């Protein structure tokens, strides 16, 4: 296919859709890969109007914007691959994919990572019970499957996102009977599923507890590619360093949207616009950069969602590997000074989520015990697989490569 630039966009949220559409022009072959049933990403579950949107999305609610995006994709030449995970990004821009057609590799000229964000979870007594869920899970229940996550619900979280979630739950018919600003001191209990929640003794009957604690960027694939990272005070974690065109320190690898640092829907889309044009060396890049400058919104520093010193010793911090807080504290006491050290000593972070659910908490536990600040802390090493993949599928791929 000489003369054709192959571009793979990973993640079909607003930023990935926008990147794929803008990159899709004569001379470019674009593949858009997303693990969900449909393209649209997180906005598929949002009933809010998009603030400060690009003109084409003016007045649209989140789910409308994703329907619009899917209609544009259908009319394009973009090769859209849903139910497909990218589980590794290796040297020379080699991408490992697993989808309905099995496991395979791609080696495009350019890669745009639009993998979005992951929700913050924070351990408290009873948080592993069925019925305790994150805000996105609750929104998926309500707005994708039309099911109430619970009738008597407790919400944990502060700020506009948590307020909005509470309003969404109440509009759908649930009663929000308890609201806690942080998980500190919260205890949930029940026989096989959550039945009550309390802070300092007073129990309230509930059948669901929703954590609305915000999100963290998910640049895991950029970390596989060994892209340089920097600490972001606005996100409270490390993010890939990017130039004005959204390119990372790795030539030909771009990061857009929440994956590079959580932003508004409009800014995520505008970053996709820039990367799509930059990857194809388009004359329209200057226009895209000016649209991005208009969409940028200043953000204050990240505020920790909980106090790591108050996580009870017996509570699991890593529920996949069943590692309790006391075990992590012992590891730090005996010399662990990074999340990687804690992982090696305790297995915390070795489960299916590859540390996405635990790095935030363990970093703060290290800071409490050692005084090492978050910007000084070495970020956790990310290794494939980024998503679960069966050994049989890997064997099939290895045979195909041979
Ligand atoms: C609680 C909350 C409230 C918000 N409220 C607002 C608001 O009111 N106004 C506003 O403007 N913005 C809001 N935002 C922000 C806005 O929703 C996001 O900025 C925007 O949706 C991000 O789009 P994205 O394309 O970067 O990521 P996403 O929409 O998260 O899409 C990423 C996609 O990539 C897929 N993916 C990830 N990894 C892989 C992989 N390895 N292989 C295959 N697929 C993968 C994911 O499944 C997902 O489909 C809110 C965000 C949150 C979390």
Image (cartoon, rainbow, N blue to C red):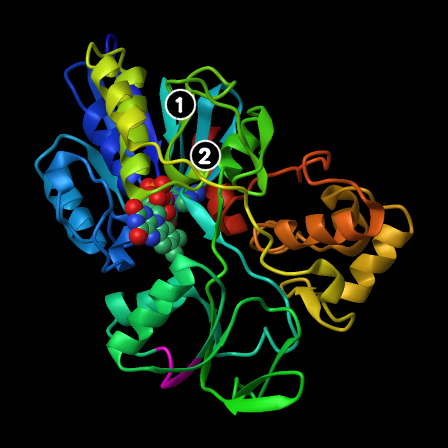
Q: Which of marks 2 and 1 is nearer the N terminus?
A: 1
Q: Is residue 151 magenta?
A: yes
- Give coordinates of residue 177: x percent, y percent: 43, 84
Q: Check whether the beta carbons of the residues at disc 2 and disc 1 lie within 8 A of each other.
A: yes
Q: What is the number of the mark on residue 260?
A: 2
- Give coordinates of residue 303: x percent, y percent: 57, 50
Magenta segment: 149-153
What is the secondary structure assignment of the residue under circle 2?
A: helix
Instruction: Say whether residue 324 is visible.
Output: no
Q: State the residue at coordinates (52%, 85%).
A: 193
Q: Is the magenta stretch mostly helix, strand or loop?
A: loop
**Spatial separation of the CA atoms under disc 2 and disc 1:** 9 Å
Q: What is the number of the mark on residue 161?
A: none
Crowdedness near tag 1: few (<14), some (14–19) or many (≥20) residues, C-alpha within 10 Å: many
- Give coordinates of residue 339: x percent, y percent: 73, 45
Image: 307 above or below 268: below
Q: State the residue at coordinates (52%, 90%).
A: 204
Q: Is residue 254 magenta?
A: no
Image: 348 above or below 397: below
What is the secondary structure assignment of the residue under circle 1?
A: loop
Q: In which quarter of the image is residue 346?
A: bottom right
The N terminus lies in quadrant:
top left
Q: Name the residue under label 1.
A: 246
């Amino acid at each position: 296919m000489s003369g054709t630039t192959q571009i793979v966009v990973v993640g079909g949220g607003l930023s990935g859709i926008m990147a794929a559409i803008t990159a899709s022009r004569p001379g470019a072959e674009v593949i858009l890969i997303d693990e969900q049933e449909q393209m649209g990403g997180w906005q598929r579950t949002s009933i809010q109007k998009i603030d400060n949107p690009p003109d084409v999305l003016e007045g649209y609610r989140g789910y409308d914007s994703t329907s619009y995006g899917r209609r544009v994709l259908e009319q394009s030449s973009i090769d859209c691959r849903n139910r497909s995970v990218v589980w590794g990004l290796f040297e020379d821009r080699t991408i490992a994919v697993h989808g309905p057609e099995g496991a395979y590799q791609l080696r495009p000229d350019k890669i745009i990572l639009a993998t979005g964000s992951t929700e913050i979870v924070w351990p408290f007594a009873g948080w592993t019970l069925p019925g305790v869920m994150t805000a996105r899970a609750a929104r998926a229940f309500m707005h994708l499957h039309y099911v109430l996550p619970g009738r008597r619900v407790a919400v944990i979280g502060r700020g506009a996102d948590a307020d909005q979630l509470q309003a969404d739950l109440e509009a759908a018919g649930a009663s929000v009977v308890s609201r806690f600003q942080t998980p500190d001191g919260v205890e949930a209990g029940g026989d096989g599923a959550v039945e009550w929640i309390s802070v300092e003794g007073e129990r309230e009957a509930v059948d669901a507890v929703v954590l609305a604690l915000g999100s963290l960027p998910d640049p895991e694939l950029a970390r596989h590619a060994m892209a340089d990272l920097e600490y972001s005070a606005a996100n409270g974690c490390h993010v890939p360093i990017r130039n004005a065109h959204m390119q990372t320190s790795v030539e030909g690898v771009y990061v857009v949207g929440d994956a590079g640092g959580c932003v508004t829907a409009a800014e995520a889309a505008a970053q996709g616009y820039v990367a799509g044009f930059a990857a194809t060396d388009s004359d329209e890049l200057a226009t895209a950069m000016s649209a991005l400058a208009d969409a940028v919104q200043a953000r204050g520093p990240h505020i920790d969602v909980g106090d790591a010193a108050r996580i009870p010793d017996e509570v699991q911090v890593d529920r996949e590997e069943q590692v309790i807080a006391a075990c992590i504290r012992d590891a730090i006491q005996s010399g662990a000074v990074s999340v990687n050290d804690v992982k090696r000593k305790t297995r915390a972070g070795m489960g299916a989520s590859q540390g996405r659910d635990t790095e935030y908490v363990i970093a703060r536990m290290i800071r409490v015990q050692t005084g090492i600040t978050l910007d000084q802390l070495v970020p956790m090493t990310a290794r494939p697989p980024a998503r679960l993949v069966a050994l049989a599928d890997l064997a099939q791929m290895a045979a195909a490569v041979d």
